[in-house]
């Protein structure tokens, strides 16, 4: 049985490209278009890892979703990799760093993310 990846991202083209990449490497991929759907799918699909965008219907939606996932007793053990273009989109002079409190994710990758970087990060953090 292959590892399951849940992508939560409102950019369907980006999600499709990542799905093709992950599928070619033997992962099973499911996709949610927003944070609410993503949280519901995390419960129903029990993914081995979640790839989470930040800016969806709200600019900070991904940060809110990451906190909701971490606060849920069942979902908090699913590793989350945040993939975002928020720094360049908002021209922020600083980077976000994962931590155990405010941003409880395993890694934070900047869009556009290189395929080999994404695959290595997924392999490093996926539940086995």
Image (cartoon, rainbow, N blue to C red):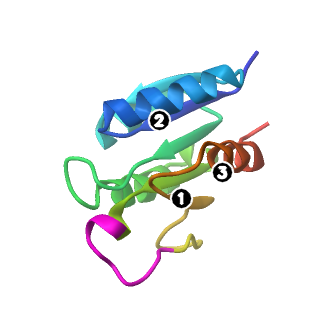
x and y, in percent, of residue 99 in the image? 58, 73
Q: Dot 1: what SS?
A: strand
Discs 1, 3 touching: Cβ within 8 Å: yes
- Cα distance between the residues tagged 1 and 3: 9 Å
Is residue 89 shown above or below 82? Answer: below
- Would residue 86 appear left or right of 17 to someone viewing this image? left
Q: Dot 2: what SS?
A: strand
Between discs 1 and 3, the one toward the N terminus? 1
Discs 2, 1 touching: Cβ within 8 Å: no
Q: Residues within 10 Å of mark 2 (few under 14, many from 20)?
A: many
Looking at the image, which residue sits at the far top? 1
- Would residue 110 appear left or right of 85 to someone viewing this image? right
Q: Quadrant of residue 115?
A: top right
- Cα distance between the residues tagged 2 and 3: 16 Å
Looking at the image, which is closer to me, 4 or 100?
4
Q: Is residue 93 magenta?
A: yes
Residue at mark 1: 109
Q: Dot 3: what SS?
A: helix
Is residue 95 shown above or below 109? Answer: below
Residue at mark 2: 7
The label nearer to you, 2 versus 3, is 3
x and y, in percent, of residue 4 in the image? 63, 26
Q: Is residue 2 magenta?
A: no
Residues shaded magenta: 88-96
Residue at mark 3: 117
Q: Which SS type dominates the magenta stretch?
A: loop
């Amino acid at each position: 049985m292959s590892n399951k990846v849940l992508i939560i991202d409102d950019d369907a083209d980006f999600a499709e490209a990542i799905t093709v990449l992950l599928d070619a490497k033997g992962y099973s991929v499911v996709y949610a278009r927003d944070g609410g759907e993503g949280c519901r799918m995390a419960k129903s699909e029990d993914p081995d890892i979640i790839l989470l965008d930040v800016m969806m219907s709200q600019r900070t939606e991904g940060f809110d979703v990451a906190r909701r996932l971490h606060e849920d007793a069942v979902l908090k053990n699913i590793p989350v990799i945040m993939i975002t273009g928020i720094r360049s989109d908002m021209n922020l002079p600083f980077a976000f760093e994962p931590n155990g409190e405010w941003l409880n994710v395993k890694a934070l990758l900047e869009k556009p993310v290189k395929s080999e970087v994404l695959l290595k990060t997924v392999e490093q953090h996926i539940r086995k």
